Image (cartoon, rainbow, N blue to C red):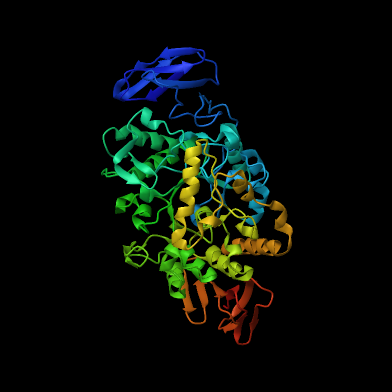
Amino acid sequence: MVFRVWAPGAESVELELPPRRIAMNAEPMGWWSVDVDARAPAEYAFIVDRGEPLPDPRSPWQPFGVHGASRTVDHGAFRWTDERWQAPPLASGVVYELHVGTFTPEGTFDAAIGRIPHLVDLGVTHVEVMPVNEFPGEWGWGYDGVDLYAPHHAYGGPEGLKRLVNALHEAGLAAILDVVYNHLGPCGNYLSNFGPYFTSTVRTPWGDAINFSEAGSDEVREFFLGNALMWLRDYHFDGLRLDAVHAIVDTSAVHVLEELADRVEELEREMGRHLVLIAESDLNDSRLIRPRELGGYGLDAQWSDDLHHALHTILTGERGGYYADFGCMRQLAKALETGFVYDGCYSEYRGRRHGRPLGEVAKSKLVTSLQNHDQVGNRAAGERISALAPAERVKAGAALILLAPFVPMVFQGEEWAASTPFLYFTDHIDPALGRMVSEGRKNEFRAFGWEPESVPDPQEFATFQRSKLDWDERERGAHRDVLRWYRELIALRRRLRGDARVEFSEAERWLRMDRGGASVFVNLGDRPRTLPAKGRLLAASRPDVEMSGNGLVLPADSAAVVEKAG
């Protein structure tokens, strides 16, 4: 069994393979290796310059957490049954975002498998799993992970994750993994003990930036590129969602995202499977999703928050923080037609111009949502949209998101207006770090006008427990009605084609979105409206929506879809 590690500045590196300590051999370019007789799976650690034993930076499994020993994994031993699997096109898909720890009471990969039939019945096509690589403690969001190659031990480790992906494929659902390549968490982050993984010349909100373009960066880039390819190759994921790429600082001629897109295309040809890369960015920069031959990075899609913000402000009336840039029907109409509201125009919140036009890039390269983990979990009390606006108004908002020309994403529980919040929760083992997180969380929300005292302590176990979905409420009262509406809209989405053309009234707060042979009407005003319409009523959010001789009669806070006559 061969063990290898990159430690370019080390004078010596040893392999700890209990009860033995074995000197490793220096190789070119800062690598060290040793071939030993060991029984798999083996627990091991590396010792750099006679220091403390440290986990492998590329550890495939951390069964004892971020500070414990690493364990080997034989990726060839798992029996996959998805040999003929091919993911459906993202452009015509519906994404479902879930967090493994709160998706079920058990909070494991295997428990999530039991809820796959619900996702199939809902009609989604892609399941996006929030980060699952090893992070401190037993519970957390996963964005402060440190062992990027190791599936979280509390979720079920490598074998559990493979069973989940295999089961999704057996059910006809694609699997997308959320990965974080802009920072690592502070607790258990031992990369600096091995090499120049970070640079102090650039700072991010989370500390020193990752070294993607300074001295020693070739192997650092390969560390992250190799990680991305591992999830696609060894765990059979159909795509990756790349967290906050605007915080990736790379001054190279070939940006690491462009290189990643190229490497994934190579793997795609090798495996004969469709793979996708989806970026999260707050820059409204269409270069991310333009083809590389046209000067872009060649990613397949990117998150776009403008439609969410425009719709959220109208549904709830909130205008604090970054919502100050939104609040009118004109912006909602622009987001539906063009993708970005801020496409080079002035942003009052930022105090400068922001974004660039989407141009000729297909609208189906934008992923939009009525809510997601950020927009819910980064609120002081983790309230969902269903706790902030009347149910009928939220249903009207869902119609616009699910029937717009973009790729819609549904956040776990949204489809039945879950009553449970999704809070920010952590389980930092270091008490000092835990206190810093708790205090920082309170101070973060002052711009939104939220009282620090209203912020649940992220370190409390109860904060995590409160965020778990209550699956029993799906079939009760208003929850059942919302679930029916989501299923109906997702099924109806397949009949709509093309970009959107929008008409609206700022004063009366109604909007009409035409796509292909159908029109989506929403009335977000406080009184009924009769709007010109001819055709067949395909769906309505309320039973008192009706077609009359004068057109479509829409009560306040309602939505309807009409198939055009002829």
Quarter occupied by residue 315: bottom right
Name the spot of residue 499 as percent of width and height, x first.
46, 67
Compared across the picture, whether 326 is left or right of 482 comes to left
Name the spot of residue 299 as percent of width and height, x first.
39, 50
- Above-or-below relation of 12 to 348: above
- Above-or-below relation of 417 to 271: below
Residue 30 or residue 125, whichever sits in front: 30
* Residue located 59% across and 73% down the image: 559
- On the question of residue 414 being in view, the answer is yes
* Residue located 52% across and 76% down the image: 512
- Above-or-below relation of 103 to 17: below
Count of labels in the image: 0
In the orientation shown, which residue stands out farthest toward the bottom? Answer: 550
Name the spot of residue 549 as percent of width and height, x first.
63, 87
Name the spot of residue 284 as percent of width and height, x first.
37, 59
- On the question of residue 135 being in view, the answer is no
* Residue located 69% across and 61% down the image: 479
Quarter occupied by residue 446: bottom left
- Above-or-below relation of 344 to 196: below
Please state, as top left, top right, bottom left or bottom right, where the C terminus lies in the image: bottom right
